[in-house]
Image (spheres, coloured by chain):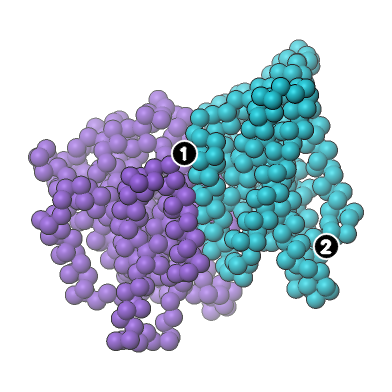
């Protein structure tokens, strides 16, 4: 009886984090038509910045609960600083180039960011158990589960809902939908397309960094997590349909549960099962589960 | 520029006499560069069709692991038999995956290749009772045409063995690019829909190119495995594939000598970056790649063309493919 519960809990946990990262990836793709290979690096950057700020804060000896805002602040800073810089300096000059060139540029960015992180935080893994240990554990159907993990699920879900509401409900969100649907017409209507792109990319970067920072206390933050993140996030957005936010949510749930099940039942083929599902989805729906909605992509 | 037969023979001859002139550490790097130039060529082959693969490490690994497993489990010793087997296996892998992947272009093509190579990497890592896991597999000195090479000249023999298989690979791709199928691949890059209008099958062109590219990737892995003597799952890791793409861009993918120039410059760049910038060598690569993409999109090889251009103007009809 415990195994299904563990699979479900872990699966949902993986899913919400993956959703944050994949939502950023799909948002950037939807608005800018660029698949950002360095997106996983933004996730890693968030994980590093968040846990680093927590460690720095705990050293000052302030009240312990304030480390949660520190964790979130790390993610926000990482995303909000890197996002506009990358979009303005690196991506703007290549909007008109071919897809292949855009992929190569973001790949170069991935290489650069990997070493930047090694230079700042070193190559040794970072373990920060503070935020995890402080809240203690709870027993759910006979499985001991950390309160932090439940909190994480709530925060990630809340963020996801907030983002989709913001895209549908606010002026800026609607401008993003307009640019996604037709770049030229939006420009003709007076939308500052460049600014929308910068904002969309920054939002994507913050989402990825947030995913990294939230999961940071649960994992060993070390070089290599960025690759894992982009590989899984790619599977998620492909299953859901590139550019679709609902698709990313469904894809994240599928990938999260599958991964949790594979880790429990057949640990050797964990990654392979995720990709087998992706291939199966693509065979029947080449544009992903929500990919057909060409008219409106986010 | 298509090097004529005279120029090509001269190049092969230059590589043939290189061991007389160069120190042994350079020869080792050159052996590796030659071996890897074949997979860079495989990337360039697809780039001509506007397709970039971030997963050629899987064919590279398929070739190398065929050799390693063939030696470990089937006691095969003959290098040519192992090489033939490795090329067959990697072509087979490409034929199987191509059924699926050849349907995609652009981002999907790039990322699906990467995704599947990551799966193969994970399998090589986790099925350790077959593949040796992270320890990898050792590759013993093979026999070549039944003769066991002398331990003293081993490196020299491996160099010539590599050269002997690399040169034909370049010849084959040159022939392919100048065959109807090769021209069709270029047309697919320019306008896929019109190729269909002409009554040609885009799917068939890409599928055939993909299999040839996979076979070349395998050959490269085989040669690299023989000259390094040890293979690890990282051969299939996506950053390995990324390095191949980098080398292709560095040399320029539009001309036959490009991949060779790219692979040699890459091996030397990498070994110097390791020496002088051990902690920032990925960054060095990234910056170099950005500079090339933004300012020299046709690669290093075209520098020579710029120099010869005033002597022999380039016909406007054959503008550079990239």
Q: Which disc is residue A175 wearing?
A: 2
Q: CA distance from mark 1 to mark 2?
A: 42 Å
Colour applied to chain A = cyan
Q: Is residue B294 visible?
A: yes
Whether marks 1 and 2 lie on the same chain? no
Residue at the spot 57% in from the left edge and 67% down from the top edge: A98
Q: Which residue is mark 1?
A: B121
| Residue neighbourhood size for the residue with mark 2, other residues' Cα within 10 Å, grouped as few (<14), some (14–19), many (≥20) | some
Residue at the spot 76% in from the left edge and 29% down from the top edge: A68
Q: Which chain is purple?
A: B
| Foreground of the two, B133 or A201 | A201
Q: Secondary structure at mark 2?
A: helix
Q: Is residue B159 above or below residue B189?
A: above
Residue B84, image x, y percentages? 27, 49
B270 sits left or right of B296 in the view: left
In the rendered image, which quarter contains the C terminus of chain A? bottom right
Residue A276, image x, y percentages? 59, 41
Q: Is residue B20 above or below residue B115?
A: below
Q: Which disc is residue A248 wearing?
A: none
């Amino acid at each position: 009886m415990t195994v299904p519960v563990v699979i479900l809990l872990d699966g949902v946990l993986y899913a919400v984090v993956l959703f944050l990262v994949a939502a950023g990836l799909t948002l950037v793709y939807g608005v800018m038509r660029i698949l950002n290979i360095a997106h996983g690096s933004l996730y890693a950057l968030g994980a590093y910045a968040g846990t680093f700020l927590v460690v720095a804060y705990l050293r000052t000896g302030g009240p312990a609960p304030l480390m949660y805002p520190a964790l979130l602040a790390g993610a926000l800073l990482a995303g909000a600083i890197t996002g506009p810089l990358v979009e303005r300096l690196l991506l703007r000059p290549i909007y008109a180039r071919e897809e292949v060139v855009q992929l190569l540029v973001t790949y170069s960015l991935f290489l650069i960011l990997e070493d930047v992180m090694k230079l700042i935080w070193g190559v040794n893994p970072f373990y920060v158990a503070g935020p995890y240990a402080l809240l203690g554990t709870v027993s759910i159907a006979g499985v001991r589960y950390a309160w932090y993990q439940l909190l994480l699920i709530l925060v990630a879900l809340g963020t996801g809902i907030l983002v989709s509401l913001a895209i549908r409900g606010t002026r800026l969100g609607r401008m993003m939908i307009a640019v996604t649907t037709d770049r030229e017409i939006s420009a003709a209507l007076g939308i500052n397309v460049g600014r929308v792109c910068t904002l969309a990319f920054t939002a994507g970067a913050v989402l990825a960094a947030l995913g990294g920072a939230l999961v940071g206390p649960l994992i060993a933050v070390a070089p290599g997590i960025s690759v894992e993140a982009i590989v899984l996030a790619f599977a998620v957005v492909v299953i859901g349909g590139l550019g679709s936010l609902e698709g990313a949510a469904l894809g994240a749930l599928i990938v999260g549960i599958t991964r949790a099940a594979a880790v429990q039942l057949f640990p050797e083929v964990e990654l392979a099962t995720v990709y087998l599902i992706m291939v199966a989805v693509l065979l029947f729906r080449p544009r992903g589960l929500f990919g057909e909605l060409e008219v409106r992509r986010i | 520029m298509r090097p004529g037969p005279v120029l090509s023979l001269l190049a092969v001859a230059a590589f043939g006499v290189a061991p007389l002139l160069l120190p042994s550490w350079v020869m080792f790097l050159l052996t590796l560069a030659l071996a890897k130039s074949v997979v860079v060529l495989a990337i360039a082959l697809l780039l001509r069709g506007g397709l970039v693969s971030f997963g050629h490490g899987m064919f590279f690994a398929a070739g190398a692991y065929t050799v390693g497993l063939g030696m470990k489990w089937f006691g095969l010793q003959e290098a040519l038999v192992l090489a033939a087997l490795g090329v067959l296996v990697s072509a087979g892998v490409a034929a199987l995956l191509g059924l699926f992947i050849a349907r995609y272009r652009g981002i999907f093509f790039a990322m699906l290749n990467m995704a599947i190579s990551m799966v193969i990497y994970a399998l090589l890592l986790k099925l350790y009772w077959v593949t040796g896991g992270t320890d990898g597999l050792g590759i013993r000195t093979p026999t070549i045409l039944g003769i066991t090479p002398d331990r003293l000249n081993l490196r020299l023999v491996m160099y010539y063995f590599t050269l002997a298989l690399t040169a034909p690979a370049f010849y084959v791709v040159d022939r392919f690019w100048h065959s109807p199928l090769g021209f069709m691949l270029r047309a697919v890059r320019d306008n896929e829909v019109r190729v269909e209008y002409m009554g040609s099958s885009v799917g068939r062109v890409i599928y055939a190119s993909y299999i040839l590219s996979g076979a070349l990737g395998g050959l490269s892995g085989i040669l690299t495995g023989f000259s390094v003597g040890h293979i690890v799952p990282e051969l299939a890791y996506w950053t390995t594939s990324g390095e191949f793409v980098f080398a292709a861009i560095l040399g320029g993918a539009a001309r036959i000598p490009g991949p060779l120039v790219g692979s040699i410059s890459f091996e030397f760049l990498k070994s110097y970056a390791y020496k002088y910038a051990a902690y920032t060598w990925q960054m060095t690569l990234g910056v170099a790649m950005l500079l090339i993409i933004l300012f020299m999109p046709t690669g290093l090889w075209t520098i020579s063309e710029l120099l010869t251009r005033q002597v022999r103007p380039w016909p406007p009809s054959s503008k550079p493919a990239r």
